[in-house]
Image (cartoon, rainbow, N blue to C red):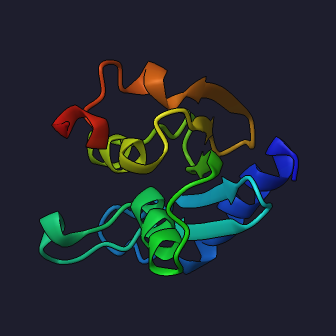
Amino acid sequence: MTDQELVKKAFEMHQFSYVPYSHFPVGAALLTEDGRVFTGCNVENAAYGSAICAERTAVLKAVSEGCREGWTAIAIAGQGEDYCWPCGACRQVLYEFAPGLRVLAARGDGDYKEVSLAELLPCGFGPSSLQ
């Protein structure tokens, strides 16, 4: 799967977002080395702290289906003029499973930028930090 195809899958997830408060749909698509893609969308809640981001939705789907390793890239697509980077909580959750992950952050016009998760979360804290 190309990076552009992965970003397209992230944009397709906008249709499933539940965003009655922010009105800002976000989609994510997590690619594994064996070609599987786990998608997610943001789901808001009247108790704002209970909302979940698209990236964490994709991660939870992957883990709940037995995929805990081999993640190669995640595309995150917002609708605004700025690139849609993962929040701090999402960076930490992604780091738990794939500190070397490539992150593709897309803005509303479809353009995207790529960085490594390590660039977004330098000196990250993960499972090896507990040994």
| Nearest the eye: 78 or 30 | 30
- Please state if 99 lies on the left or on the right of 111 as rendered: left
Name the image quarter holding residue 49: bottom left
Q: Is residue 115 above or below residue 63?
A: above
Nearer to us in this view, 76 or 72:
72
* Residue 20 in picture, x, y percent from top left: 35, 75
In the depicted structure, whether residue 78 falls above or below residue 88: below
- Quarter location, residue 127: top left
**17 up-or-down from 75: above or below:** below
- The residue lying at 46 percent from left, 57 percent from top is 55
| Residue 30 in the image, given as x and y percentages of width and height | 62, 57
Q: How many numbered badges does the structure rendering display?
A: 0
Q: Quadrant of the C terminus?
A: top left
Residue occupying the point 42% across, 25% down:
120
Residue 34 location in percent, x, y? 78, 60
Above or below for 112 versus 98: above
Which image quadrant is residue 101 in?
top right
Where in the figure is residue 81, as x and y percent of width and height?
Answer: 57, 35
Residue extending furthest toward the front: 131
Residue drawn 61% across the image and 69% down it: 39
Q: Is residue 6 left or right of residue 24?
A: right
